[in-house]
Amino acid sequence: MTNSLEAQLLELREEGKKAIAAADTLERLEELRVSYLGKKGQLGALLRSMGQLSAEERPTIGAIANTVKEALQNSIEQQRAVLEGAKIQAQLEAEALDVTMPGTYRPQGRIHPLNGIIDKALDIFVGLGYTVAQGPEMETDYYNFEALNTPPDHPARDMQDTFYLPDGNLLRTHTSSVQIRYMETEEPPIRVIAPGRVYRRDNVDATHSAVFHQIELLAIDEELTFTDLKGTIKVFLEAMFGELPIRFRASYFPFTEPSAEVDLQWKGRWLEVMGCGMVDPNVLKAVGYDPEVYTGFAAGFGVERFAMVLHQIDDIRRLYASDLRFLRQF
Ligand code: DAH
């Protein structure tokens, strides 16, 4: 009996050590631990049969059983260390960054010519102390026309026919509406620049679009004069186009008095590039400013027009076509 139990214990030890050394995952190792050393495990089963031993035999066999248990525990710990080390190593290898691998190619983006003009104009005016302002594209008749000294029967409305919304509002025809909104909430002195999208009920052709972009500027202060307007526009156009001859031509806008059109000599021709003037006293009154105290000047220009001149673009529609062959040139 003694011998056979001792032999079984030793056999269990050898078999167990082999199986443990061969375990290739931590899960498998845990299965083996339960199978050999667990409550219902093989070692436990052998020990339960010790009840049949004589009192002299028991301590000897008990001591052997303990060495078997320890040997198996040691093997398990050793194998666990090996497997955990391998697991960490595998993880490190999987997550390693190989800096010699070729990168993922992403085509480089470019600034759209319209955004390029807007960015440049804002840069110039911010440099002159102006603040950027914006307003809604859906506007009321009041902000787009009425407050800008353009009542319902005014002939100037003909040139700015637009899209009317079912609720009586409209799509703004110019960024001049931002002037009114800004002055309503701020007090002079004011220096603002307002870029934005505007709408006209125009048939689309090489030089017209029903949607285009404008930039508006407005300065209000005590004692601003036409000279300040001229100086500001000259500095701006020079920064934008370079030093070229410019001229101011008398014109008419309901919201300015006097009003002027600015022409730029470009490749031997006079080109009309912006409208401007001294803010009409009626506009100042509409926002509650005293025209005896404050004067101001305003100007507006089309972004597409500037882009077409600067980049020699012959058809406005190219600016909206999203044709990469065209856009990659900028
Ligand atoms: N709002 C005018 C237009 O759309 C442009 C313009 C002219 C704006 C004169 C101004 C200005 O502020 O003073 O044609």
Image: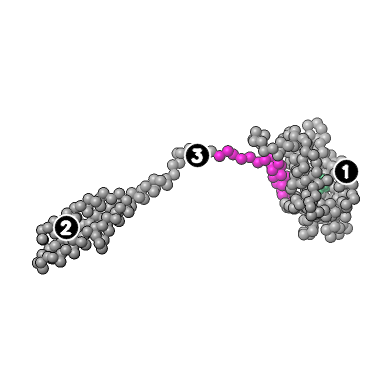
- Residue at figure coordinates x 85%, y 57% from the top left: 286
- The picture places residue 94, in percent across and down from the top left corner, at 40, 46
Q: What residue type is labelled 1?
A: Ser
Q: What residue type is labelled 2?
A: Leu
Foreground label between 2 and 3: 2
- Residue 1, compared with residue 18, is above or below; it is below
Q: Assign the magenta stretch its main secondary structure.
A: helix
Q: Residue 199: in sight, yes or no?
A: yes
- The picture places residue 64, in percent across and down from the top left corner, at 15, 60
Residue identified by numbered label 2: 9
Nearer the N terminus, badge 2 or badge 3? 2
- The picture places residue 201, in percent across and down from the top left corner, at 80, 43
Considering depth in this image, is 319 or 123 the residue closer to the camera? 319
Nearer the N terminus, badge 3 or badge 1? 3
Q: What element carries label 1?
A: strand
Check if mark 1's residue and mark 2's residue have beta carbons within 8 Å.
no
Circle on res. 140: none
Residue identified by numbered label 1: 251
- Residue at figure coordinates x 32%, y 51% from the top left: 25
Q: What residue type is labelled 3?
A: Gly
Q: Does the magenta stretch include residue 128?
A: yes
Check if mark 3's residue and mark 1's residue have beta carbons within 8 Å.
no
Give the magenta-colored segment's residue range.
Answer: 106-130
- Residue at figure coordinates x 22%, y 59% from the top left: 42
Cα separation, mark 3 vs mark 1, equals: 58 Å
Q: Is mark 2 on a helix, strand or loop?
A: helix
Q: Does the magenta stretch include residue 101?
A: no
